[in-house]
Image (tube, rainbow, N blue to C red):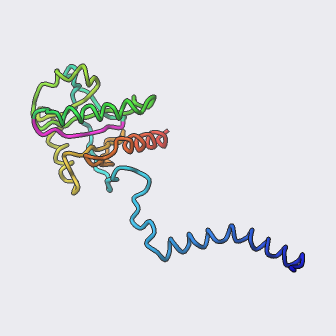
Amino acid sequence: MVNKKSKARFILLGVASIFIIPILVSWYLVFFTEFKKDDGGTQKGEIISPVISLGELEVYDIKNDATSSINDKWTLVFFVESECNQSCEDKLYLVRQIRLALGKDRDQVDRLLVSGKIQSWEVFSDSFNGQKYIDPRSKSYAEVVKKFEEYPKFDARGTYLVDPFGFLMMKYKFDANPMGTIKDIERLIKNQK
């Protein structure tokens, strides 16, 4: 039979071990194993480091071809090389839905299509109201395309995030889950406030 003094010591040891064992296990995992090595963090996209300054951009509104600005807003950027086919329409739809899914924060996000060909976007103006685009007739087109292409992991099929100061800072693969993009933008907007 265990006496009261020994029983009290076992209880104290048990309570102390509840707190000490997790600390020892985490210390071991961090310093002596490959646990979470090269973990990119909680973001769903790929952070571009160092960020790339795009500067002031002259963009056009899809509805009326009026010159517009995307400064002071988070901007989702994607590329279309030639005529807008079904995959282009799907991308227009997806980026619009990502913006709408942000709810009350959607006014802090813009959408920019970089078109490799001058074409009329009027046919899309009702469905994708508020969409901005840039094409070879814009003064800033060549410079923007050059800056994107200088990024070593550039993929014209991907979607890119530009911060309100005009810095290209995140890339999403073409098959990335849109929920991840939404969560990243929500987190960025929340931390910006």
Q: State the residue at coordinates (46%, 41%).
A: 192
Q: Nearer the viewer, residue 119 or 92?
A: 92
Name the chief secondary structure element in magenta. Answer: strand
Task: Quadrant for the N terminus, please.
Answer: bottom right
In the rendered view, tell whether residue 66 sits above or below residue 144: above
Q: How many marks?
A: 0
In the image: residue 106, left or right of residue 135: right
| Quarter of the figure with residue 61 | top left
Residue 146 pos. (x, y %): 16, 48
Point 44% across, 29% down: residue: 103
In the rendered image, which quarter is residue 188 located in?
A: top left
- Viewer-nearest residue: 79 or 21: 21
Residue in view at x 19 percent, y 40 percent:
79
Specify the segment rendered in magenta: 74-82
* Extreme residue toward the right, this view: 4
Residue 135: percent from left, percent from top: 14, 34
Residue at the extreme front: 1
Please tell me whether residue 80 belongs to the stretch shown in magenta: yes
Residue 107 in percent (x, y) is at 39, 28
Front residue of 104 and 20: 20
Measured as percent of width and height from the top left, residue 48 is found at 31, 53
At horizontal 18% and vertical 50% (from top left) the residue drawn is: 149
Was residue 188 drawn as part of the magenta stretch in this picture? no
